[in-house]
Amino acid sequence: MATFNRVVRSPLTGKFVFNRIRQQSQIRRTSYQIYRNRAAVTDELVDLLYTPSCDPGAQQVFASILTAPPGPSPAELLPKVERPLLVIWGADDPWTPITGAKIYEAARANGKDIKIIPIPNLMPVIVLIMKFRILSTSK
């Protein structure tokens, strides 16, 4: 992992990796892995995912997200939650399967106020967030 972090953080190799990953054809291929319904991978979706990669500093954001330490796990954080918690989970998401939600189900069974909403796929939620970002920043 240390080698990967160095490659991604490097101004030269990091830019190369970022530019390969952010290509619209690559975004489309990756989206096909995530969406069960390939028809959902539209030109609009690809553009929506691609556009932020053109922002100044996008490569640095990409590098910092991929190389940042993971932070506390849900198992560490859940005992500290004192308010109701809404968990929206991509039930069919191949990258983060809903089996990961078991920890939330167990906490709910132990008295935590947790509502779990499985949706077919998490990507539509991400797209909605991105559309909101675009609408809220346009003047």
Image (tube, rainbow, N blue to C red):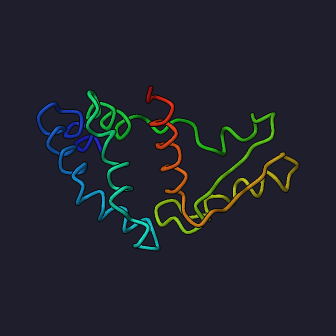
In the image, is 78 to the left or to the right of 138? right
Quadrant where the image shows the N terminus: top left
Residue in the picture at 40% in, 73% down: 38
Residue 43 x/y as whole percent: 32, 59
The residue positioned 68% from the left and 50% from the top of the image is 87
Query: Residue sitting at 43 percent across and 65 percent down?
Result: 34
Residue closest to the eye, 57 or 42: 42
Q: Residue furthest left?
A: 12
- Seen in the picture, residue 85 relative to 124 is either above or below; the reply is above
The quadrant of the image that shows the C terminus is: top left
- The answer to whether residue 26 is left or right of residue 87 is left
Q: Position of residue 60 (x, y in %)?
A: 28, 30
Above or below: residue 52 compared with residue 105: above
The residue sitting at the front extreme is: 139
Q: Position of residue 96 (x, y in %)?
A: 52, 59
**Residue 73's spot in the image, x, y percent?**
59, 42
Name the residue rendered at 75%, 43% in the picture. Answer: 85
Above or below 113: residue 40: below
Question: For this view, does 110 lie left or right of residue 72?
Answer: right
Is 138 situated above or below 105?
above
